[in-house]
Amino acid sequence: MNWAWSQELAPSLKLILMALADCAGDDDKCWPSVGKVAKKCCVSERTVQRVTQQFVVAGLLKIEERFDQKSGRRKSNSYLLNIGQSSHPDNLSPSKTKRNGTGDKLSGTGATADVRGDGDIAMSPLEPPKESAYEPPLPRLDAGRVQALIWPEGLSLVELDSIRNLLMGIEQSKAQILIDELADALRCKTIKTTPPRWFRGVIAKYRQGDFQSTGGVQIAERRRQIADLDLKRKQSEIDMQRELDAALMAMSDEQFEAAYLDIPVRIKSRLAKRRMVLGTSWSQS
């Protein structure tokens, strides 16, 4: 349970991880059904399935399918928590300290025995969930202070949340520079571990005053160029509209009819309405 507490996750994600850790025995394994975890955490079964898959990607746990040996019927998945496996490259939190022989003191033995029984049948990911179509949204990763930050694509939900927590206390403009450095590393595929673990090293250099942006400068420059082109395009559209407005206002009704005699009625009607908005009166034939 202490291991789950130490993970830098959003409340909803941490609650699901803690629910699994609460069910785990001394072998770090548990097999509660998706429905029980969802009920325990007050979320939908679909959310539990999605979040546990994100945990797999982040290296927090492994999932194994279980089947009844006699009937072949699928049972609840088995979850192996990666507690204390410091050699695992995807571990996002410090290694677990040595356990005593009694297991987690915060977990009741009755609860553990209850969820590990063979009577729980898991819901297959291919089966439609028997629940309302409404699903409570998970916390926004860009909420609050970091709302304007521009994140690179390809990061998982858990990875984004971990990186966001690492940026807490850093000025937003500086945070964007650090994120741009991550974006360049992802683009060049130079990260050998996981993005959060790599980014933790960048943060350490930044706090020590040793960080120097390299590839992130190119990412920022590319974003600036795209923004400039978009601004020019919008300004060009505004200028074209002004020229068209000036031409429409300078026309008499007769000139308008003659100039747009052969255009489709729909377009002609829109131009006529535009003239009316600009204050030019005319009689629609």
Image: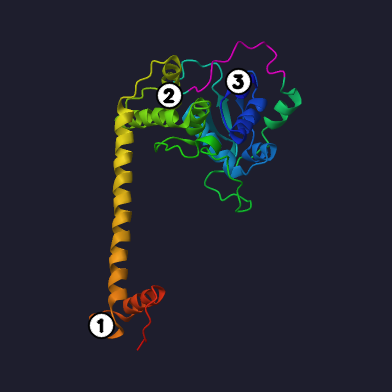
Say above or below: 31 vs 241: above
| Dot placed on the residue nearer the N-terminal end, 2 or 3 | 3
Q: CA distance from mark 2 to mark 3?
A: 21 Å
Q: CA distance from mark 3 to mark 1?
A: 79 Å
Magenta stretch, main secondary structure, is loop
Say above or below: 140 vs 276: above
Residue 204: % across, % down: 45, 17
Q: Amino acid at mark 3?
A: Trp
Q: Residues at badges 2 and 3 in contact (C-beta under 8 Å)?
A: no
Q: Amino acid at mark 2?
A: Phe
Which quadrant does the C terminus fall into? bottom left
Give the labeled residue for mark 2: 199
Q: Residues at badges 2 and 1 in contact (C-beta under 8 Å)?
A: no
Give the labeled residue for mark 1: 255
Q: How is the image coloured?
A: rainbow
Q: Residues within 10 Å of mark 3 (few under 14, many from 20)?
A: some
Residue 72 seen by the camera: no
In the image, 138 versus 39, the foreground residue is: 138
User: For the image shown, how many numbered marks are present on the structure?
Assistant: 3
Give the labeled residue for mark 3: 3
Q: Secondary structure at mark 3?
A: helix
Q: CA distance from mark 2 to mark 1?
A: 65 Å
Residue 271 seen by the camera: yes
Q: Residues within 10 Å of mark 1 (few under 14, many from 20)?
A: few
- Mark nearer the viewer, 2 or 1: 1
**Part of the protein shown in magenta:** 91-105
In the image, 17 versus 183, the foreground residue is: 183
Q: Amino acid at mark 1?
A: Gln
| Dot placed on the residue nearer the N-terminal end, 2 or 1 | 2
